[in-house]
Amino acid sequence: MLALRLVRGGRPLVQMRRLLVAAASAGTGFLLLCTLGYALGHPEASTGAVARLLWCAVPLAATAYFAVAVARSDPGTKPRPGLSAVGLGPARLTLLATVSTALACALGSALALLFFLHLRGGLFGLPFDGAARGLLAADRPLPLPAVLTLLTCVPLVASGASAVVLRPQRATASARGGRRAARTAEPPDTEPQEPFAEPAPAPSGLPWGVALLAAGLAVETYASRAGAGDGLRMPGGLGGSPSAVLAGWALTALGLALAGPALTYLTGWALQAVRPGAVRLLAGRVLQEEARRIGRPLGVVCAVASGAYAANVLYGHAPASAPGLGPLTALGAVLVVGCTLATLLTAAVEARQARRHTTAALLRLGAPATSLRGAAALRAGALLLVFTPLTWVVAELSAVPLISR
């Protein structure tokens, strides 16, 4: 009941994020149900059905990643002074965030089921002149256990990921909130006992990220030259690729995600180098402080962008007889790209809210608003200058082994 009250009492921006999570869950659930429809309509093509189900793991991971980002930025489940006294400690707040994520994803799964049944003609007749009848196996009964299993995948994965990711951060934030409350309870004329905070330490994921990136490119190149059969069928009529090539592609994506925070931190350090002014110093320090919060979503966006670029190049080299990009493939691509971009925007909004007290203090001290806007523009430009060439290079190197087969 408390989770329902928190969901109902959220601000419009928070409600919009939850609705976006529900929409992403609906899209992923619909893809899973369409895979079931394909398996029912083509019982002899079990390999193709399994391949379609495996490819659904990509939008499922993107949806869960976005749901975790929304749960992390939800103000209704963040620790505040006094909540522990009424039994809302770190474990209870994590449980509330998990339940809220499960509710949003369950709503999306219910919408996916309703839309799927509507396209099959099970609610109000066949829409679109029965165009989806063969695709969704409308002439065959749906196995209820399979439907329920597929629809519970997104809520279980998203809520489980939220519980795993948010638990240590909730505890740390609760400890920081308790220290902050203790400092505010001191008399005004008392000197603070804690020294000023040191700059955030540099993230340590750059060596691992570079190593995984290099290993992924090497695996792709070796597997493409070895020519280990057709391998897994790629969606959208792009033909087949060896499993090792796709595994190398996954390694490059993981490497970009791990290297993102460190690259963001180094970008902030470069902005402050060589006699910085006030604007460059502020922009660089903010990037260093927010490197972990926005660096990983940036790395994931770069990985998705490089994958989309490589897939576009591969689609351009496909034979003329290859089938076109189907609606389900387009839906999966929209889900992956949309979830990663929404996660980055959510992280950026969360970072802005986290430093709102610092921004207000600078304005009270007389800092011009143009300087703050200039620092924000400088941060965005520096990140684009660093991550855009990196994305293009990784995309080109990832596309070469796929085209050369």
Image (tube, rainbow, N blue to C red):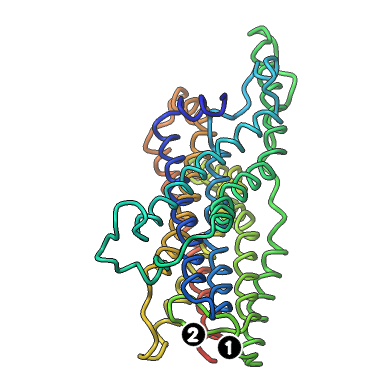
Identify the mark at residue 230; answer none if there is no mark.
Answer: 1
Q: Quadrant of residue 12?
A: top left
Q: Does residue 48 sit above or below 327 in this rendering?
A: below
Which quarter of the rendered picture does the C terminus lie within?
Answer: bottom right
Q: Residue 199 in the image: x percent, y percent?
A: 67, 40
Q: Earlier in the sequence, mark 1 or mark 2?
A: 1
Q: Are marks 1 and 2 in contact (CB under 8 Å)?
A: yes
Question: Is residue 150 at all visible to an observer of this figure?
Answer: yes
* Relative horizontal placement of residue 298, taking residue 83 as reference (left or right): left
Q: From this viewpoint, which residue is outermost toward the right? A: 193
Q: Where 248 falls versus 87 (above or below)?
A: below
Q: How far apart, in angstroms, are the residues tagged by discs 1 and 2?
A: 8 Å
Q: Residue at x 58, y 80 (%)?
A: 232
Task: Report the residue at 60% width, 76% height from top.
Answer: 246
Query: Element at badge 1?
Result: loop
**Viewer-closest of 313 and 264:** 313
Which quarter of the image is occupied by the N terminus? top right
Q: Total marks drawn? A: 2
Asked whether 131 or 60 is in front, the reply is 131
Which numbered marker is on residue 369? none
Whether residue 379 is visible, yes or no, is no
- Please say if 287 is above or below 91: below
Q: Secondary structure at mark 2?
A: loop
Residue neighbourhood size for the residue with mark 2, other residues' Cα within 10 Å, grouped as few (<14), some (14–19), many (≥20): some
Q: Tell me where residue 90 appears, x and y as whole percent.
A: 70, 29
Tag 1: residue type? Answer: Asp
Q: Which residue is mark 2?
A: 239
